[in-house]
Amino acid sequence: MQTQSTQAKQNQKTPIPEKFVYFFSAGDTDGNAGMKSILGGKGANLAEMTALGIPVPPGFTISTEVCTHYYECGGKLPEWTRPAVEAAMKKVESKIGKKFGDVANPLLVSVRSGARASMPGMMDTILNLGLNDQTVEGLAKISGNPRFAWDSYRRFIQMYSDVVMNMNGSLLEVTLEDLKAEKGYHYDTELKTEDLKVLVKKFKDLVKSTTGQSFPTEPWDQLWGSISAVFRSWNTPRAITYRELHHIPASWGTAVNVQAMVFGNMGDDSATGVAFTRNPSTGEKKFYGEFLVNAQGEDVVAGIRTPIPISEMAKVMPEPYKQLTDIYMKLEKHYRDMQDIEFTVERNTLWMLQTRTGKRTASAALQIACDMMDEKLITNEEAILRIDPASLDQLLHPTLDPKAEKTQLAKGLPASPGGVSGQIVFTAEEAVEWKEQAKKVILVRIETSPEDIAGMVAAQGILTTRGGMTSHAAVVARGMGKCCVAGCGDIEVDYNQKTMKVKGYVLKQGDVITLDGGTGEVYLGLVKTLEPQLSGTFDRIMKIADSVRRLKVRTNADTPKDTETARNFGAEGIGLCRTEHMFFGPDRIDAVREMIIADNTTDRERALSKLLPMQRSDFLSIFKIMKGYPVTIRLLDPPLHEFVPHTEHEIQEFAKRVSMDVNSVRSKVSSLHEFNPMLGHRGCRLAITYPEIYKMQTRAIAEAAAELVKSGDKLVPEIMIPLVGIDKELEILRDLVVNEVETVQKEKGIKFDYLVGTMIELPRAAVTADLIADHADFFSFGTNDLTQTTLGLSRDDSGRFLGSYVSQGIYAKDPFVSIDQAGTGLLVKMGVDLGRKTKPDLKVGVCGEHGGDPDSIEFFNRVGLDYVSCSPYRVPIARLAAARAALMGKKLHS
């Protein structure tokens, strides 16, 4: 992902915006929800809530444009921002009736990030800004609650020293825990005023000794430092990782929101909470969330204390709860989507601090979309556009078998669904390292923080001992579709010993556990899983998607099992059946090797005759499952060296089994070596040299088709010739295929329709597609090889450096995952246009990995392909992505 500083270097003269500070307060609001690109999501929604008459503490938003200037100025806040910020602060003072930095009646503020796309926990926040040794006394006096004032002060020092001064936050946390242990306290709320005063002094001394700087006491210095730190947090490693994961451009930047503080830690009549207007895990239409009495916001999301279900708030604070209920209903109706809200109750007065579209699991997204259609809140088309196609992947993988024997270790909160097993690791770094060794891991933490994001991505699942359903771990895991169990308090984690203890068990790093994110249960060892059972909401959404999409969706499948799976997921045919995958079975690999080792056509044909019935059986099984849907079979593509024995032991064993001279085998294997086999003797080039190979495969296809048609079923097999770069190649091989099919039809006395086409996977084929189309009934773009040959990148080797290309913005995404539209994509478009210039009705599809990527599917829809083909488990993703592509195309042209 391109960093903001890289982008800034490319654009050193961004003009200074006329307006870059936007005020929001009751009756005086500059922005609205449609200004997310300037105000960020948080700032735009704060302005919108204020305009709706919802109680929001006054404040102002510094626009994302200033973030760009911050990086252009080398990571410094431009001087021209200061007068506008100072003027906005005066407006906040007049609205709130307090003065920033005033000793007697101090105004305290929060400073928060806010990008246009939600990035929960990835950037920084500072609360209680404006406190020092003098203002804390003023706050204690006007609040009548010295303990609250000093508690706010110690929190401020902790946050500011961590976020702004880059001090290791655990140092102050250890000091806090040591004092609690010394006093015999269990909770932070047990700390007395005098304890907190001692703690503040210890904190400031530790800040000075650790950083070499005194903790700043001037409120305006604190503010400028915090604004800069929030802009700086846009480019922290965790933020960059999150942006890469969710494809958020670095050029967007973040806004900064400065807002008058309201306090949930003023006593038992104060509280703070996070809630969702519907259940984000299941989609159930039920107010869902958590709160804490006498706490500040970070206590809920950081998992410092285990929160209370929001339903209990009706008993503890009935009036604020009733008001909160009215507001959440109003917000959901206004935004016409499930909302994620944050609130604070200060002395029984409710204040709203945020609303945003709530992140949800895939199953919840389907349920919410269906319910909102039924409630007439959204249309069918809007429902399709609401659901991220990639998120469906969460629904298509195994869950725990309820009948399997299990040893339950503990039960926490079901924070993000799914069933996974893996080896325990205790740090994000270990999770990444073990994944690179092809190990499946469960990341076990007391609580996660944004720094753990890379480990959370690497892990199969996440287990925390603290935190609730809206903790960092829960929110981020749900967004990624990762299984997560949170707040599992019975488990004791020891980072130093790398152990977790529960119910008498002591599990070490590397031991296997299983998580059930749907129930919150944790099990010892590996638990059997079941294939997913898709709900009625899935079927309903898929039917709507199918009704609006233009692109057909096929699958890449080589076995009856894959074919059956794909059909169950709604595949409308096979776009790529790789015949070479059928050659590696233990019952046929020797026959393949005999064919390769053969020195003459007669011996080759003898070996191929052994393969013929096997191939015919393979094709017949697949044809039967597809029941009349198109099946595209690619004739042999890889270089022959992939099939031969390689080690001396394998060579000797093979020679012995087939009664051949070992020296002859060794010599033939050596002769097949190529320096660059992917551009060597493979694909159609093999058939030009050894036509009997394609002749056997064509006969197997034709005989299987004849048998199926004879039984009364319908079938139009599509025979695909790979790696064509010159029209003459296809002309010669098309004649071979047609002659063999017609020979079989005469022998069997059966007529059936069939197509002969080619893969377009070389740049020359794309730019001469008009000539190639003379001999083709269809094109299928092999975008894996087309990407390799266009970009000059090896798919097998480029992984070592492509990450740097993406992070520096050279490629927006890995071009093997999402098609390079400007390069490879241009060749695809050229191939389509030229091919249809020769044959206007030419059928055109894609069968590379890009066929299952939503962004690539949108491109393929735009350039006029007829179908995409992808792996079986991505078929639903492609169906939904094709529908969204059609709807977005319609909106674009309306």
Image (cartoon, rainbow, N blue to C red):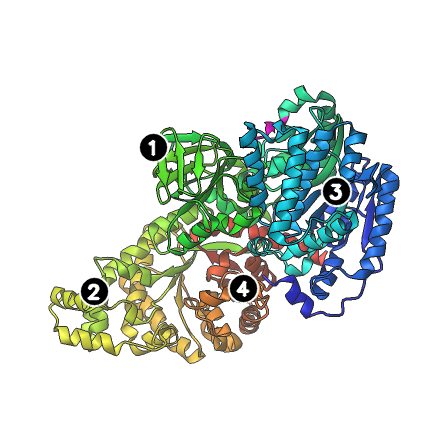
| Residue 591 tag number | 2
The answer to which of marks 3 and 4 sits earlier in the sequence is 3
Query: At numbered mark 4, what does the secondary structure look like: helix, strand or loop?
Result: loop
Q: Which residue is mark 1?
A: 404
Query: At numbered mark 1, what does the secondary structure look like: helix, strand or loop?
Result: loop
Local crowd at mark 1 within 10 Å, few (<14), some, or many (≥20)? Answer: few
The answer to which of marks 1 and 2 sits earlier in the sequence is 1
Query: At numbered mark 3, what does the secondary structure look like: helix, strand or loop?
Result: loop
Q: Quadrant of residue 647?
A: bottom left
- The magenta span reads 306-310
For the point 68% across and 42% down, the residue is: 156
Nearer mark to the viewer, of 2 and 3: 3
The answer to which of marks 1 and 4 sits earlier in the sequence is 1
Q: Which residue is mark 3?
A: 132
Under mark 2, the amino acid is Ala
Local crowd at mark 3 within 10 Å, few (<14), some, or many (≥20)? Answer: many
The reply to whether discs 2 and 3 touch (Cβ–Cβ < 8 Å) is no
Query: At numbered mark 2, what does the secondary structure look like: helix, strand or loop?
Result: helix
